Amino acid sequence: MGALMALVVQWWRLWQEVETFKPKLTLRIWRKLGSSFSPVNEVSNELKLVQVVDSEEMERDSLLEKMEHADNPSLREMLHQYLQGRQYLIVLDDLPKRIRLQSILGALPYEDKKSRLVFTSHTTSANVRIMDHEVYDMEFLDSKKSWKLFLQTINRGNKLGGEYNFPKELEKQGREMLTKYCCGLPLAIKEVGKQLAKKRCLGSEWEELLQQPIDLGTTLEKLDPFYHKLDEEVKPCFLQMAFYKENITMREEKMEQIWSAKGGEGSAHREDFRLKNLPDGIGTLIELRYLGLRNNHIQELPDWLGRLKKLEVLDIAQNFMMEVPDIIWEMRSLRHLYLSHVICRKPLKIDALQNLETLTYISVDNWTYGLSGLKMLYRLRKLGIEEMNGNTDVSKLFASLTQLRNLKNLILKGFRFRSMPCLDKLGILQNLQTLKLDGLLARLPNSFPSNLESLKLVNSCLEEDPMPLLEKLPKLKHLKLRNAYTGQEMVIVYEYIPSLEVMCIEELWNLRNVRVENGLALSLKQLEIKNCPNLETLPESIRYVGGLKMVTTKIIATKIRRSGISSNMRVVDINP
């Protein structure tokens, strides 16, 4: 829940300043709000009370009577006059989501720069965002800050102290425990620290404590009120998480699709269960919207699955060599279909699914020769085609793709370790914004779609530096190269790709040197470097790119820090 907290004005700055001008403050109010809060009535009443107490004895009765009969505009004007020239600190704690703040903001003068108005909220309210103030979003703690808080908590709670403090040699196990149980949530970190400190005082050894389960019941009780503050339509989405394994990593688009299926009420999940056969009972769930069967051992999809006429998402990917009968076309409500390496005795009649928005993956032969009504797939936005090789009829493939007017995201995958065909006609797909090429390439296509914003080259193993051609993509914002280049040097001319914001280079095993010529990557916000063991350093000019975030492994981060290049960069280490 900490990530949802929005604080208008940064807290630590505020409280440092308060100590400086506290003697000069003539008005200090801290008001706990909550869902029943009415800014006109409650805060005005608070300020009215202060104003009355501050008045002369003879004026109080008449002032109270005047305020009781004042309408809201008059009351705001009176409060404005009262606060004029005063230094005040007003804290409105726990701001509700749906609330109009204009009524109180209009009563507060802002001439005095040392006066402060602070809002705290558990939601990122539009009211908070539109105000002309600093907004501080509370994020989960990173590994370094989590460990610091843990040590502070556990050593403070361990009354034995000294040699009984948490031993440094167990730091690795301790960090792993925090990652497993706490995920950067301060409330959970402190709870774990307190529990371990208490058990240590009772005589347990640290090694034993780290192997014992942690009870976060107290933390969950403290978080319970936040659940009840969620919107009613969001609560089922939150409860849906109980279906999944602990600490599971989930694709963002999958989450969106599950939640769109009535908050998961119309969902069935049998993913990662190593199933070989589907329970017959699933066929009776005629209201089912989402069926996830990814990463199992299912050998054949049953015919009765075609009865699920309302199914919107079917995910049967990563069931290697699953046989799929001629039933997919019967699921006319399908919007998202995920397959991979399936066996079809008849071509899948995908063109019958007019509501389809996502299709990954379909074999290139099934797509090219098995479909005739591609123009009916006018909603298709994301398409993945697999099993491409040197014999693929690229001309016919690209001609079919031009019929998909709303296609924005395309993935082309090669067939195992065979080379992909020449893709020179790729540039005719002018509507594409996102492209991923996964497979061996003798060379890059001589042209790319001019509107391309995101490009991933995976397992391309190019012998020539891909950057000279990629620099001809003026709208490119995200670039990922994973096992895409076998050379030792890469030359980047950032002035030719002025929009590039995120660049990721991964598994470029031979790369030793990256050169930047003719300008700086002024638009670059994030640079990721993973598994490039021979890369020694980065170009000197990178240090002058303001606000650059680097995500890399500890080994590479250490090399870069030693070179001095990271002085103006925020370096985030990842394992290993």
Image: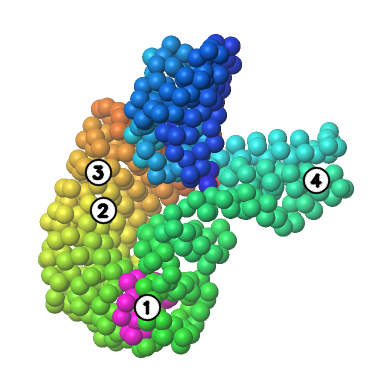
Give the mark, 2 or 3, whose residue is nearer the N terminus.
2
Identified by mark 2, the residue type is Thr
| Colouring method of the image | rainbow
Q: Residue at position x 76%, y 36% from top?
A: 155
The circle drawn on residue 287 is 1
Query: Which of pointers 1 and 2 indicates the residue nearer the eye?
Result: 1
The circle drawn on residue 434 is 2
* Separation of marks 4 and 1 at Cα, in angstroms: 51 Å
* Separation of marks 1 and 3 at Cα, in angstroms: 42 Å
Element class at badge 2: strand
What range of the chain is rendered magenta? 305-320
Identified by mark 1, the residue type is Glu
Element class at badge 1: loop
Crowding near pointer 1: few (<14 within 10 Å), some, many (20+)? few
Element class at badge 3: loop
Element class at badge 4: helix
Question: Is 527 covered by the magenta stretch?
Answer: no
The circle drawn on residue 198 is 4
Identified by mark 4, the residue type is Lys
